[in-house]
Image (cartoon, grey):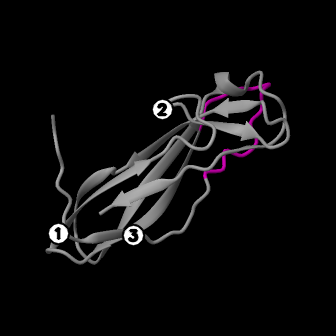
Amino acid sequence: MSAVILSAGNCRFRTASTTLDFGLLDPGNPANVTVNATIGFRCNGGPPNVTFAISGDDGLYESGPGSPRMRHTVQTTEFLPYGISLSPVSGTVPRNTNQVLAVTGTVLGASYGNAAAGAYSDTVTLTILP
């Protein structure tokens, strides 16, 4: 068993949304594609330091826990798996100080080598506590 007691502060994302754009994926040359983005956040109130925890769901079209996938925008029975990671997912930071969350997404070449042509998308919701 384990537990984390979050501080009395409050944390908020400073960026309302961000996009991970994998660009054009060529099934004729299926290479792994990794993209990065950052999201700002800030923890206020509480003691001089605030302990936070960030989590993300697996998107709207997950095939199971830890298995996010994008859905084709026209052929809605077609999906493209991807991976997503966040860093840091928890920690203690000085209050009233801007922080940065790194978001990394990866689509494996093997995942789109035989995928239907067209656009794919998904929405992942991030939560920050406290």
- Circle 2 Cα neighbour tier, 10 Å, few/some/many (<14 / 14–19 / ≥20): few
Q: Quadrant of the C terminus?
A: bottom left
Q: Quadrant of the N terminus?
A: top left
The earlier-in-sequence mark between 2 and 1 is: 1
Q: Amino acid at mark 1?
A: Asn
Q: Which residue corresponds to the image point at 66% horizontal and 25% vertical from the top-left?
A: 111
**What is the C-alpha distance between the residues marked 2 and 1?**
31 Å
The earlier-in-sequence mark between 1 and 3 is: 3
Q: Which residue is mark 2?
A: 66
Left or right of 108? Residue 65 is left
Q: Amino acid at mark 3?
A: Arg
Helix or strand or loop: what does disc 3 sit on? strand
Q: Which residue corresponds to the image point at 77% horizontal and 30% vertical from the top-left?
A: 78
Residue 94 in picture, x, y percent from top left: 21, 71
Q: Which residue is mark 3?
A: 12
Magenta region includes residue 30: yes
25 up-or-down from 55: above or below? above
Q: Which residue is mark 1?
A: 49
Residue sitting nearer the eye, 124 or 1 = 1
Magenta region includes residue 105: no
Helix or strand or loop: what does disc 2 sit on? loop
